[in-house]
């Protein structure tokens, strides 16, 4: 039976592993494990960075995602951003992300959160199909970034 819950520090090794795998699968990017270790653990030591959620099957973490927060002056409330979504390959297309999304959406509905957002790599058509099926809208915005190397 799959359960969805907020992550705790003991979940960090699985989340770190998932981040390294996701970066390679989606962008063929090799991340620095020590940096990812620090970044994941920073979320557990300072909740203003966000909150991790995991899906667990028989005590094994099979998926994780990170919720971060954006203040919306237009809405006078917070928007939750889904980031770093990863589901182990053997559990994909089985409704794991849908369960996570619905649980988090229910949590957002009970709080002062005005909405949920995510971004997706432009070539990740599988994820886009999933998000469309959940009733999420693809927006007219294009994302730009500047990142220090």
Image (cartoon, grey):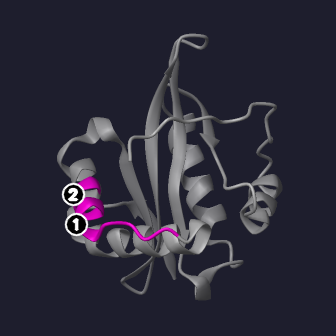
6 in magenta:
no
Residue extending farthest to the front is 149
Query: Mark 2 sits on what residue?
Result: 38
Residue 42 position within the rendered picture, expressed as x and y whole percent measured from the top left? 22, 50
Secondary structure under the numbered disc 2 in the rendered image: helix
Mark 2 closeness class: few <14, some 14–19, many ≥20 residues within 10 Å: few
Magenta stretch, main secondary structure, is helix
Residue at position x 24%, y 64% from top?
Answer: 37
Residue at position x 56%, y 60% from top?
Answer: 100
Q: Badges 2 and 1: C-beta atoms under 8 Å apart?
A: yes
In the displayed structure, 50 sits above or below 115; it is below
Residue nearest the observer in this picture, 76 or 118: 118
Residue 25 position within the rendered picture, expressed as x and y whole percent measured from the top left? 58, 74
Residue at position x 27%, y 54% from top?
Answer: 39
Gap in Å between the C-alphas at discs 2 and 1? Answer: 6 Å
Residue 63 position within the rendered picture, expressed as x and y whole percent measured from the top left? 49, 72
Q: Which residues are magenta?
A: 29-39
In the displayed structure, 56 sits above or below 114; it is below
In the displayed structure, 2 sits above or below 133; it is below
Residue nearest the observer in this picture, 107 or 87: 87
Residue 140 position within the rendered picture, expressed as x and y whole percent measured from the top left? 81, 31
For residue 142, which numbered disc appears in the image? none
In the displayed structure, 94 sits above or below 8; it is below
Secondary structure under the numbered disc 1 in the rendered image: helix
Query: Mark 1 sits on what residue?
Result: 34
Q: Does residue 113 appear left or right of residue 51 in this picture?
A: right
């Amino acid at each position: 039976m799959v359960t969805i819950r907020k992550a705790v520090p003991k979940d960090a090794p699985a989340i770190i592993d998932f981040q390294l795998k996701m970066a390679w699968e989606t962008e063929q990017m090799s991340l620095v494990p020590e940096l990812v270790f620090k970044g994941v653990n920073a979320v557990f030591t300072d909740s203003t960075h966000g909150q991790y959620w995991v899906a667990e099957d028989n005590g094994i973490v099979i998926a994780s995602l990170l919720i971060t927060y954006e203040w919306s002056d237009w809405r006078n409330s917070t928007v939750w951003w889904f980031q770093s979504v990863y589901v182990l390959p053997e559990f994909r297309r089985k409704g794991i992300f849908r369960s996570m999304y619905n649980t988090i959406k229910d949590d957002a509905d009970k709080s002062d959160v005005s909405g949920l957002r995510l971004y997706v790599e432009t070539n990740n058509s599988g994820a886009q199909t999933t998000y469309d099926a959940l009733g999420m809208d693809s927006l007219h915005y294009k994302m730009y970034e500047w990142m220090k190397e």
